[in-house]
Amino acid sequence: MLMRTRHGWSDNPDAEDVRAALESAADATRNRFVIIENDEDHYMQTLAHDDGWWLEKRTGGAEHHYRAEKEGGPLPVDKVDREDVLEALLGYLNGNDQGPGHLIWAKISV
């Protein structure tokens, strides 16, 4: 498994690597992303915004690309909070691509 951030690539990231990458993305002014991938068509990625985080996953080709949505709460429906992102990315490291149970995965066109 690989992790890509604005600082480059790292092999076999662990939980602390993911936490540090999210902290760095949150504090950055540009290139605020973290991607964890098995291969080019199987990955989970996030992008920090000032009003929340986009969380996306791909489980095959472009026709299998999804964005997490969260109903209710203070954030726009297509944004999630950092705790959800952390839980999702740590789960992905352990083979779970579903993320927290309260997230809804909506298919998007890329």
Image: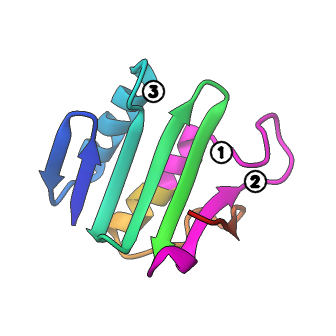
Position of 78 with respect to 65 (left or right) is right
**Front residue of 40 and 16:** 40
At horizontal 55% and vertical 43% (from top left) the residue drawn is: 83
Amino acid at pointer 3: Ala
The residue drawn where x is 31% and y is 65% is 37
Q: Distance between the Cα atoms at labels 1 and 2? A: 6 Å
On the image, numbered disc 1 is attached to which residue? Answer: 80
Dot 3 alpha-carbon crowd within 10 angstroms: few under 14, some 14 to 19, many 20 or more: many
Q: In the rendering, at what x and y percent does residue 21 appear?
A: 31, 37
> Mark 2 falls on what kind of element?
loop
Q: Is the C-beta separation of discs 1 and 2 under 8 Å?
A: yes
Q: Amino acid at mark 1?
A: Val
In the picture shown, does residue 19 fall above or below 40?
A: above
**Quarter containing the C terminus:** bottom right
Tell me, for residue 70, which label it has, or none.
Answer: 2
Q: Quadrant of residue 92?
A: bottom left
**Is the residue marked by circle 2 packed among few (<14), some (14-19), or many (20+) residues within 10 Å?**
some
Q: Is residue 80 above or below residue 75?
A: below
Residue beneath disc 3 = 26
Give whichever of discs 1 and 3 has the lower sequence position: 3
Residue at horizontal 30 percent and vertical 70 percent from the top: 40
Residue 2: percent from left, percent from top: 21, 60
Q: Secondary structure beneath disc 3? A: helix
Q: Secondary structure at mark 1?
A: loop
